[in-house]
Image (spheres, helix red, strand yellow):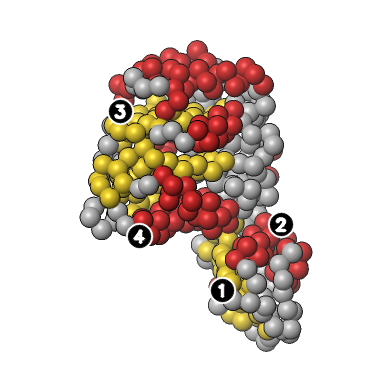
Amino acid sequence: MSTLSLPQGFQAAVMAAGIKPSGKTDLSGVVSATPCTWAFAGTRSTTAAACVTRNRDLYAGGRAVRGLLVNAGNANAATGARGANDNEDMADAYGSVLNMPAEQVLTASTGIIGHLLPMDRVLSGIEHLPDELGTGAEDFAHAIMTTDTRVKLAQATLPGGARIVGTAKGSGMIHPDMATMFAFAFTDAEVGQTALRAAFPGIVARTFNAVTVDGDTSTNDMAIVLANGEAGHVDPPVFLKALEGVMRDLARQIAADGEGATKLLTVRVTGARTEAEALQAARTCCVSPLLKSAVHGNDPNWGRVIMAVGRSGAGVDVERMKVSVQSQPVFAGRPLPYEDAAVSESMKADEVVFDVHLGVGEAHGEAWGCDLSAEYVSINADYTT
């Protein structure tokens, strides 16, 4: 049973519609009692799935929405006109059973690319979703999972009692290019759509765009925040700071649950010319197979950091550059003395942190990834078979 409730005015429903071969829950929906202001970010992949392109079109229209329908186990990507029609039929069906226009329903699909949706099962499931509506968030978080090993949830409470509850899914095919896999945040705070949409790209850049597991960007990535205003007005800067905190928490959870991961990799960059360059340097470190392998083997090979920063395109002054591993300084314009065995032992932790100072400015940024294990290859070698 769910113990974390959605903010007031939101309900969720989940069911096993037969999309996943495992028989686990794979169809879920969220609905708000009142129309929501909202913000959206979607993958910039040129092979984006039907759900992304449809949501992007709705976003450009600027209308309020009330519903979100998610299926897991089938990406409905690279499925042509049939896939686009199926996606539209899903929105129509969900809107029909909840008495709202299809234009107020957002859709999201995740799973294997290139397979048509089993629409008889999907439509039958949608028909029964209203019977399952409740306020729990954890069942919804379970239902959107694919290769994830754990649910991803985060929340914040604002002065005055308004709440933000966020959930995400993502474990592989994760790399910045929007990259958020799926992230959905629901709030009962009253937030103006203009302010929300103006701030959202920056929040995404500092959170989900700072996550990389394997260097591959999905066809279906998206992040959505829905605000129904039922808890009343909140101070916009306070709300946006809390929303970024929730998204940051979810981003770290995604990185820690990377396919085959045994530990979270965090790279903190300071001394950069711009925030964009700091993030680029940090992300390049996190996606490096060589650094990720060293982290897996508890090898304090800081040369992999020097290499990754050098190819990232970020400005750097090597003579002023500094690198630390698990707070142990190892480089400051030159190699520093340290005990290899002691640093290696410190890397046997749930999180391994590299601090990198570029020596060319005042900007900073942080990115998250995970180690690279043989299990990652195993998972993806058998993904469709």
Q: Nearer the viewer, residue 241 or 321?
A: 241
The CA distance from mark 4 to mark 1 is 32 Å
Secondary structure category for the residue under label 2: helix
Q: Amino acid at mark 4?
A: Val
User: Nearer the observer, disc 3 or disc 1?
Assistant: 3
The earlier-in-sequence mark between 3 and 1 is: 3
Secondary structure category for the residue under label 4: helix
Are there few (<14), some (14-19), or many (20+) residues within 10 Å of tag 3? some
User: Nearer the observer, disc 2 or disc 3?
Assistant: 3
Note whether 118 is above or below 351 in the view shown.
Answer: above
| Res 339 quadrant in image | bottom right
The earlier-in-sequence mark between 3 and 4 is: 3
Secondary structure category for the residue under label 3: loop
Q: Which residue is mark 1?
A: 326
Give me the residue at 64% from left, 72% from top. 272
The CA distance from mark 2 to mark 1 is 19 Å
Are there few (<14), some (14-19), or many (20+) residues within 10 Å of tag 4? few
Q: Amino acid at mark 1?
A: Gln
The CA distance from mark 3 to mark 1 is 46 Å
Could you tell me which quadrant the C terminus lies in?
top right
Which numbered disc covers residue 289? 2
Q: Which residue is mark 4?
A: 238
Give the farthest residue toward the left.
160
The earlier-in-sequence mark between 2 and 4 is: 4
Secondary structure category for the residue under label 1: loop
